[in-house]
Image (cartoon, helix red, strand yellow):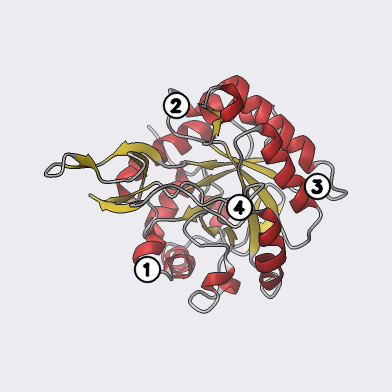
Amino acid sequence: MRVRFAGIELRNPIIAASGTFGYGIEFEDIVSLDRIGGLVTKGLSREPMDGNPTPRLIETASGMLNSIGLQNIGVAAFLEKKLPSLANYPGCAVIANVFGYTVKDYVAVIEALNRAGGIAGYEINASCPNTKHGGQVFGTDMVELATLVFAAKAAALQRANPRPVIVKLSPNVTSIAEMALVAEQSGADGLSLVNTFLALAIDAKARRPRIGNVTGGLSGPAIKPIALRMVYETAKTVRIPIMGLGGVVTAEDAVEFLLAGATAVQVGTASYADPRAVERLAKGLEQWCVKHDVEKVASLTGGLEVG
């Protein structure tokens, strides 16, 4: 069940996705953290953030719409109050999700994380608006994305033992494969595909948006076919490994992402319906491999037969 992703050794390819698993330690009484491949922390910013106005999360047909607004305690509080407890689970890879509204914000967070132990890598959330350049989302503009990834990689390289930089791309683009290639050429060691899709839900009777911030990010099973297509197209374009995510609920969902070209799989929205989903899927994937005579789960990656 072991796989290697951008230099990170994972006991299995099932990862808890950012924003759906707290900072990881909150789940230790519910999920056996030593049975999953790893976790991606809630997004970490330079300073604490309160997030968007409520309501911030609603159920949709086969999915969920959220506009949390990247509420978090800030990188300093994470290092002081959350990260030390995760040292009790050395086999669970901790990947820190990093975000900001300027390139300097991202760099500052990475530099703070560089000084701490117990972190396997950095996941760069490229779906944030660059407030210094008119609010253009980093992940939807090639120049902005290249600038961000280059700076993040340079900051990560300041550490004596550099950690890999994984770029989480926005799917709200014309060609995600092209954006992935830009990230790779700018220094990314891996990719996370895909983030949520920009969406809107309306209360017809009240004639008002159902989300306080008007629009939000759509996730869950509803987006899985699109996410699979994006992983497949990207895997044919880049050489760096991919973490696939978007509607993973069952072990077979995870297998589909691996066949499409992913090396590992993140589980997000499923954790809202079942807080133990990530552990259940790790066990379920192993059982699937046994049932289908798959000796090494890594052999599934890119195994989709076309034509």
Name, please, the residue furthest toward the top.
143
Query: Residue tagged by mark 1?
Result: 274
Badges 4 and 3: C-beta atoms under 8 Å apart? Answer: no
- Residue depth check, mark 4 versus mark 1: number of the one nearer the observer: 4
Residue 285 drawn at (x, y percent): 46, 63
From the viewer's perspective, tell me whether residue 115 is left or right of residue 62.
Answer: right
Nearer-the-camera pick, 122 or 57? 57
Q: Which mark is residue 97?
A: none
Nearer-the-camera pick, 42 or 282? 42
Query: Residue tagged by mark 4?
Result: 48
Q: What is the spatial separation of the Cα atoms under label 2 and label 4, in whole angstroms?
A: 29 Å
Q: Amino acid at mark 1?
A: Asp
Q: Which residue appears at 59% of the width and 35% of the height? A: 101
Q: What is the spatial separation of the Cα atoms under label 3 and label 2, in whole angstroms?
A: 30 Å
For mark 1, give the secondary structure: loop
For mark 4, give the secondary structure: loop
- The quadrant of the picture occupied by the C terminus is top left
- Which label's residue is closer to the chain start, 4 or 3? 4
Is residue 237 something one can see in this rendering? no
Q: Amino acid at mark 3?
A: Pro
- Which label's residue is closer to the chain start, 2 or 4? 4
Badges 1 and 3: C-beta atoms under 8 Å apart? Answer: no
Q: Which residue appears at 38% of the width and 60% of the height? A: 270
**On the image, which quarter does residue 277 sit in?**
bottom left
Q: What is the spatial separation of the Cα atoms under label 4 and label 3, in whole angstroms?
A: 26 Å
Q: Which mark is residue 162?
A: 3
For mark 3, give the secondary structure: loop
Q: What is the spatial separation of the Cα atoms under label 1 and label 3, in whole angstroms?
A: 35 Å
Q: Amino acid at mark 4?
A: Pro
